[in-house]
Image: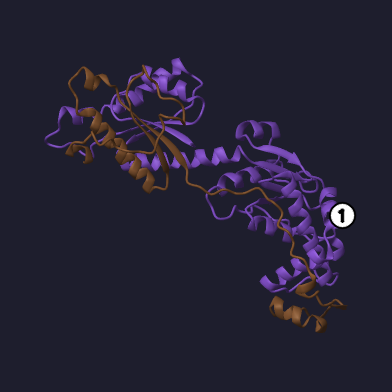
Chain colours: A brown, B purple
């Protein structure tokens, strides 16, 4: 019957163990064996999902209709959305408010994309946090 | 970036939405609207009203999209912010999984199952590459044979010692264990050379006869190092496990080669 002890004990007693009529040969001492070089396997990268958040509006709301406060409110809503997504384990990269089709956002990376920062000049009204 | 979310914080004209989509390209896009307010306050202002207008542009774009860009796929999420966040996060995780698999290569070793074919595991390879972006290749038994032959006695000793230090050995014999260790090292090197993210091993008919051992130890060591291993050349499971494995500590094994070489079977066993 095979030895049920741990591998180390099994190795220590190897010369005494018989199984299938086969005498175990002792394994070479650590000093004479070479560690197997790890094969360079493709790395499995674990990272958070990453989204680009574009906060859309139309600028003529505050340039033509007198809703000057709307930009800050929309931006605050977008910021709240980003914070909740971050709490879900999502990495959020965002822009300022995207509000003009005359100047469409550039794709993905570049000067338009940046980590979220709320411009200090914009203060959201209290109702934005409801 | 795995997913672009265009948040309609207030009403956004179709022209602007499509300026965004055209600038962004073919990547996955989700249009989202959350009513900025969690309820309707007594002092609801015109600005507050405007925070609720995004549903208009988000919903109506479906009708516009049918004519403007009928083949442009988009996802949508509407509702209260907490609910929309959950939906966006779900889409983002899926988009990340899809993006990652596009960078993966999977390999048959050496082919699909001959002896007990299961046709559900026989998807069209070209379609699989087209739909998922995964690359597919073939590895051959002789590659593992060659690598196994090159394993030195010293490397074999080290791997056997590693196994015995970590596991309680109940069977098989030392000779079998040693050959399994050699096969494990050889298999690892073949998977590394092909830069595989997953390998589908068909061990039944030829591989085990030629190598003298099943590739169990090698398969488990590969999984310990985040390589997906499936049995019977199961392509569906290889790709599925790559999708499911994203973000997990270990990709799952969706099948294991679980037979022994006939020559190694103990005649006394049933």
At which x and y percent is residue A126?
Answer: 17, 39
Residues packed near mark 1 inside 10 Å, few (<14), some (14 to 19) or many (20 plus): some
The residue nearer to you, when weighing B140 against B258, is B140
- Residue drawn at (71%, 41%), measured in percent from left and top? B119
A26 with respect to A108 (left or right): right
User: Is residue A45 visible to us here?
Assistant: yes
Residue holding disc 1: B210
Q: Tell me the quadrant of the picture where the C terminus of chain B can be found.
A: bottom right
Chain identity of mark 1: B
Extreme left residue here?
B43
> Residue B238 appears at what percent x and percent y?
65, 45
Q: Is residue B252 left or right of residue B232?
A: left
Say if A63 sits above or below B92 in the image.
above
Q: Residue B207 in the image: x percent, y percent?
A: 83, 52
Regarding residue A3, the answer to whether it shows in the image is no
As drawn, A128 above or below A8: above
- Between A121 and A50, the one nearer to me in the picture: A121
Q: In front here: B192 or B51?
A: B192
Res B164 quadrant in image: bottom right
Lateral position of residue A41 relative to residue B56, left or right: right
Please give left or right for residue B162 compared with residue B61 in the image. Answer: right
Measured from the top left, where is residue B66 in percent x and y?
45, 18
Numbered disc 1: secondary structure: helix
């Amino acid at each position: 019957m095979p030895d049920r002890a741990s591998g180390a004990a099994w190795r220590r007693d190897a010369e005494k163990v018989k199984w299938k009529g086969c005498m175990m040969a002792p394994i070479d001492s650590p000093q004479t064996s070479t560690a197997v070089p790890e094969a360079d396997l493709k790395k499995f990268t674990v990272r958070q999902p990453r989204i680009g958040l574009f906060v859309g509006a139309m600028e003529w709301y505050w340039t033509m209709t007198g809703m000057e406060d709307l930009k800050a409110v929309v931006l605050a809503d977008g910021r709240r959305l980003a914070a909740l997504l971050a709490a879900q384990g999502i990495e959020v990269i965002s822009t300022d408010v995207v509000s003009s089709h005359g100047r469409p956002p550039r794709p993905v990376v570049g000067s338009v994309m940046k980590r979220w920062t709320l411009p200090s000049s914009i203060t959201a009204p209290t109702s934005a946090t409801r | 970036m795995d997913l672009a979310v265009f948040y309609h914080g207030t009403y956004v004209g179709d022209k602007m939405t499509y300026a965004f989509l055209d600038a962004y390209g073919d990547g996955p896009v989700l249009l989202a609207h959350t009513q900025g307010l969690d309820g309707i306050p007594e002092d609801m202002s015109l600005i507050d009203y405007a925070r609720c207008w995004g549903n208009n542009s988000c919903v109506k774009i479906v009708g516009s999209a049918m004519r403007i860009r009928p083949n442009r796929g988009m996802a949508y999420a509407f509702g209260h912010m907490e609910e929309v966040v959950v939906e966006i996060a779900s889409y983002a995780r899926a988009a990340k999984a899809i993006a990652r698999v596009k960078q993966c290569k999977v390999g048959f070793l050496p082919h699909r199952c001959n002896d007990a074919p299961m046709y559900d595991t026989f998807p069209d390879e070209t379609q699989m590459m087209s739909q998922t972006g995964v690359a597919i290749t073939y590895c051959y038994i002789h590659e593992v044979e060659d690598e196994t032959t090159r394993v030195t006695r010293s490397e074999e000793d080290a791997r056997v010692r590693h196994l015995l230090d970590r596991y309680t050995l109940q069977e098989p014999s030392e000779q079998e264990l040693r050959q399994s260790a050699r096969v494990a090292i050889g298999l690892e090197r073949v998977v590394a050379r092909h830069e595989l993210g997953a390998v589908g091993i068909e061990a039944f008919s030829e591989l085990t006869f030629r190598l003298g051992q099943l590739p169990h130890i090698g398969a488990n060591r590969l999984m310990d190092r985040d390589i997906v291993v499936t049995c019977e050349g199961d392509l569906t499971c290889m790709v599925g496990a790559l999708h499911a494995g994203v973000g997990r500590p270990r990709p799952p094994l969706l099948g294991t080669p679980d037979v022994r070489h006939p020559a190694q079977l103990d005649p006394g066993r049933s």
